[in-house]
Image (cartoon, grey):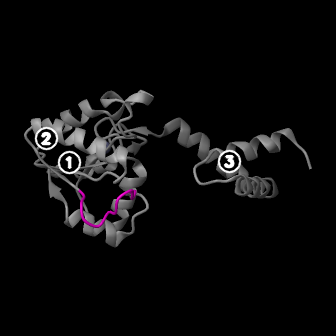
Amino acid sequence: MSSMLFDRLAEQLNRLPGIGRKTALRLAFSLVDHPELARDLAEALNETWAHVGECTVCRNLTEHELCDVCTTRADSGTICVVHTPADMRAIEDAGLYRGRYFVLHGFLAPLDGVGPDELGVDRLRKMVASSTISEVILALDSTADGEATCTYLARVLEKAGVSVSRLARGLPPGASVEFADSLTLMQAFEGRQRV
Ligand SMILES: [Zn+2]
């Protein structure tokens, strides 16, 4: 079998994280076999791409200017800083934290051109200054990049006069927040240490 369009579809699917060549082909065949599913998926992709953006305060994903969390938890005195919206989802699903968030959408990587501006550090500082925030929890992966970003943010935020803590016990070296199980996340939250 050979179709340029089909091959292109499989190649695009193959670019997604966690999708190898074989899985990409299986997904592509499945989409060809199920036109209704393909149509629904295409529509969801188009609409998401057209309407989903970042919250102007915390950089969480939203279709509005302010995300749900910023709207409903405006009084919370705590901000939990995470790497990605997926990490935020993992913490929410574990049900162990009900404060506000700030999403970095990356880690510091000066060689790749990712600095404080790309992570929205100024916006985070503004969020801390403009509300009744008393604690910032740095809930970042315990990888080298995560640690470096954590250390940098702790230094910046301490100057803003807010208590800064970081996840500690429970999250083993090299672990990512997104894939940690609820119990591990809970231990990491409860064992957070001031920096
Ligand atoms: Zn928000």
The secondary element bearing badge 2 is classed as loop
Q: Position of residue 112 (x, y in %)?
A: 44, 30
Q: Secondary structure at mark 3?
A: helix
Give the alpha-carbon distance from disc 2 to disc 1, as whole Å.
8 Å
Mark 2–mark 3 contact, CB under 8 Å?
A: no
Q: Is residue 130 found left or right of 60 in the rendered image?
A: left
Residue marked by disc 2: 131
Ligand 1's quadrant: top left
**Which numbered disc, 1 or 3, marks the residue closer to the eye?**
3
Task: Tell whether position 60 is magenta.
Answer: no
Q: Position of residue 138 (x, y in %)?
A: 24, 50
Taking the spot 57% from the left edge, 41% from the top edge, the residue there is 47
Most extreme residue toward the right is 1
Q: Position of residue 192 (x, y in %)?
A: 19, 60
Question: Where does label 3 land, which residue?
Answer: 14
Q: Which mark is residue 74?
A: 1
Q: Secondary structure beneath disc 1?
A: loop
Res. 39 in view? yes
Q: Residue type at mark 1?
A: Ala
Chain-order first, disc 1 or disc 3? 3
The residue sitting at 34% across, 35% down in the picture is: 119
Disc 1 packing (10 Å; few <14; some 14–19; many ≥20): some
Q: Which residues are magenta?
A: 167-176
- Between disc 2 and disc 3, whose residue precedes? 3
Q: Residue furthest left?
A: 161
Report the predominant secondary structure element of the magenta stretch. loop
Please indicate, yes or no, whether residue 95 appears anywhere in the rendered image.
Answer: no
